[in-house]
Image: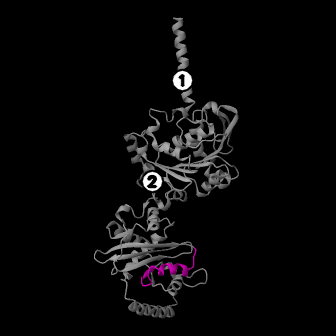
Amino acid sequence: MRENRMQQEYLAKLLIEHEKRIRYNKLKQYYPDNGNLSRDKYPKHIEFFRSGREYRERLALCANRVGKTEGMGGVEMVYHLLGEYPDWWPGRKFDRPIAAVAAGDTGQTVRDTLQIKLLGTPSDIGTGLIPKDAIAKTRPKAGSVADAVESVEVVWRGDKRKRSRLILKSYDQKRKAFQGTEVDVAWMDEEPPIEVYTEAVMRTMTTNGIVMSTFTPLLGMSEVVRMFLPEGRLAAGPVSNSRYVVMASWDDAPHLSEETRKELWESIPPYQREARSQGIPQLGSGAVYPISEESYIEDNFEIPAWWPQCYGLDVGWNSTAAVWAAIDPATDTIHIHSEYKRGMAEPAIHAAAINARGTWIPGAIDPASMGSSQADGKKLINCYAEQGLNVHPADNSVEAGIQRTWLRLSTGKLKIFQSCRQLIGELRMYRRDERGNIVKENDHLADAMRYLVSTGIMLAIPKPDEDAYRDYMATQHADRNMVSQMTGY
């Protein structure tokens, strides 16, 4: 009996020790050879790790609940802090203790998300990804957020004399809080403001370190997202010699059951569903033109000489933009075939580029050009007319113009050549905010297209005989001069 009791006690102690090792060494559960979290079931996560070997800046643009915080950013951060990498590890390795920073939105979200993922709950430190026996020291953070940790020292490769150091920060501390400290690894969990992201990149340059970003793109095509998705193109993989983007949706998260996915889908506002389920940047309360690109992008072709042509022109010092179109008289279809966009140049520079497409083409110009320029008080429309442009003020009824454009797009009456990459890129980002207002950001070509549809097509003419065209332009200039003298415009 005594022997049996001793055996039972021994087995109980083994069970307690086994549970303790699991509880305080959570990292070991990730990416084994087989099982629920095996590497072969999470190829996007492994791709994120692998790309760190070659690319200094990485973005995991992911849906909610796919494991981007814990399974991507958190796991990699802890491997670097420990200096102990599994045999299968395909990514960057450091051969010394590191300095690192991990950051999120606010002090409270950092405590409730990053801190708990890495350290565990405040009442049971060591239940996070950093093994309990590797946590050498934690330093509490002064302030109003209870139980918040400012920094943690991690034993490096089991040598208690050597330690990596991780600092926890939040974006609401502003850019200055990220200055001054050189780090090997910077991890941005949730999307940072561009100034914070830029500072993080600067902090890793001296050390040849890495910047990891893991977030769901709820801020839409922000400046940070556009750095990884040039022209708004939703394409994963290398972006440049230093940047790489991984995109993961619910389909890449085998731990999410169909029932869970359905519950999540029904709980998400419609305008956030693509971002939260697929990792596709949300467009506020919706895209202005919610229509697939395949329905309006077309291959380039030679424009028939008899098709009427026109252009729309949006003016401004930061950016002046124009789009040209030809109209198929047989189908009343507008084909936008050319674009121009340049900032910080005088009207003469823009006019030369516009005239190069054909001085005979009439244009609908931003009606704001009727106002005086800041330089000399002269009206911009007159400046462009003096440069030989045949321009007329466009109808600037924004919502009416958008409806006209949307109607043509949705009925196949407006097409865009695939070579108009900047316009297509703008349309991918052209959106309304949560209040339904148009987001006035990177939309100059989109505005020029609206002017073209609202007014330009009524001005469109086929390419004229050269002699006749010279007579026509002479009459136009004479009429414009007379009107200008009579009205002051």
Give the answer, above or below, for where 219 lies relative to 65. Answer: below
**Colour scheme in use:** one colour
Q: Residue at x 48, y 79 (%)?
A: 354
Asked whether residue 189 appears in the rendered view, the answer is no
Task: Give x and y (percent) for residue 160.
Answer: 69, 32
Asked whether residue 385 appears in the rendered view, the answer is yes
Along the horizontal axis of the image, is 116 left or right of 362? Answer: right
Q: Amino acid at mark 1?
A: His
Q: Which residue is situated farthest in the left direction here?
A: 330
Q: Is residue 351 magenta?
A: yes
- In the rendered structure, which segment of residues is drawn in magenta? 344-364
Task: Give x and y (percent) for residue 213.
Answer: 55, 49
Q: Amino acid at mark 2?
A: Ile
Callout 2: helix, strand or loop?
loop
Which quadrant of the view contains residue 149? top right
Q: Is residue 363 magenta?
A: yes
Image mark for residue 18: 1
Callout 1: helix, strand or loop?
helix
Along the horizontal axis of the image, is 7 left or right of 419? Answer: right
Other-residue count near label 1 (Cα within 10 Å), few / some / many at <14 / 14–19 / ≥20: few
Q: Which residue is situated farthest in the top direction here?
A: 1
In the image shown, does 442 or 296 lie closer to the viewer? Answer: 296
Q: What's the distance in space between the residues labelled 2 and 1, CA to CA?
A: 42 Å
Q: Residue at x 51, y 46 (%)?
A: 48
Q: Earlier in the sequence, mark 2 or mark 1?
A: 1
Kindly identify which residue carries mark 2.
Answer: 280
In the image shown, does 240 or 275 lie closer to the viewer? Answer: 240
Task: Give x and y (percent) for residue 278.
Answer: 43, 50
